[in-house]
Image: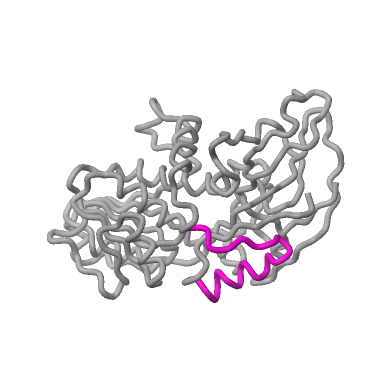
Amino acid sequence: MHGRAVYFVGPKEVEVRDHDVPAPDRHQVRVRTHLSAVSSGTERLVYRGEAPTDLPADESIAALEGDLSFPLTYGYAAVGEVDAVGDAVDASLLGERVFSFHPHEGCFLTRPSELRSIPDDVSDGRAALLPTMETALNFVMDGRPLVGEHVVVFGQGIVGLVTTWLLAKFPLGSLTAVDCVPERRQLARELGADAAVSPESLDHPADGADLTFELSGDPDALDDALDVTRYDGRVVVGSWYGTKRASLDLGGRFHRSRISVESSQVSTIDPELSGRWDTERRFSLAWDFLEDIPLESLVTHRLDVGDAARAYELLEDEPDDAVQILFTYGDG
């Protein structure tokens, strides 16, 4: 089987290479990719060469071996169809629509244990947002919003927008989205934010935010998140800054504020919840929410994988237009 794969070969350099994928061995399946979603925040760091190379790419994803040194394939949101199975694999998997945490490749081999069956009522486009929804759910679960609280979300990229959409379902006192891009602020309002403002015009809630999420990917925003949070409030940091450093003013108000700052990353579940929650329960919830997410508002571009370089240029140069990019594959 012939396919194409996206390679990051240097800072802001992307190549699409042809490759042949053999028949699966006894314990493998072969997947023909329909769509894969670009993770704009993480992949921009990889594209720019700002991802740390002294850490494994992702120890929780089998397909992401090695580190983040160039050249590498990357990505973790592939949707496709099983088109071949090994002798030791249940033949009923043939033709099944599946999701895989796999890089941008038109065809690939994997183990059945690395696949997730897609519910019949979830389209391919929605299924490609499974990691985004799972991540947003993890942020909200870590933040534990309470009735009547004032919540602020910094960053309205795709993950911030989906997080805002989930938070809008809670009976909050107020929900404010913060982003420098006007189009994204408008999307945040459409998804349920009470207010959406630029960082420069952010007015603090009356006594400050009870709960603040920093999802912008900009280290400078973390200081702003601390500044807007009230006494004894919580700041959940979901951004991955890569090699960029955050400079914080901890010498003034913060010293007596009792503000808690917590990292949140989807590969683990809060130990306080792990007695009742595991990844399977969280995935089940993510599928349910994906049925209702307003997909048309979020997916701004569908590009043939051969135009991958254009996708990352859009993320760099036209962030007001590019919210969620999907790669399509016509080569199977």
Q: Picture coordinates of residue 191 (x, y %)?
A: 36, 55
Give whichever of 310, 25 is nearer the camera.
Answer: 310
Q: Residue at x 26, y 63 (%)?
A: 195
**Is residue 11 left or right of 152 when viewed as pictured?**
right
In the figure, 171 relative to 157: above or below?
above
Magenta stretch contains residue 315: yes
Q: Picture coordinates of residue 287 (x, y %)?
A: 49, 37
Picture quadrant of residue 208 = bottom left
Q: Residue at x 48, y 67 (%)?
A: 244
Give whichever of 53, 99 is nearer the camera.
Answer: 99
Which colouring convention does the figure follow? one colour
Q: Picture coordinates of residue 76 (x, y %)?
A: 61, 49
Q: Residue at x 29, y 57 (%)?
A: 193
Residue numbers of the magenta segment: 298-319
**Is residue 155 left or right of 3 when viewed as pictured?**
left
Q: Picture coordinates of residue 117 (x, y %)?
A: 61, 33
Q: Residue at x 45, y 36 (%)?
A: 288
Residue 258 makes an appearance in the image? no
**Is residue 326 left or right of 203 when viewed as pictured?**
right
Residue 299 makes an appearance in the image? yes
**Is residue 115 left or right of 232 when viewed as pictured?**
right
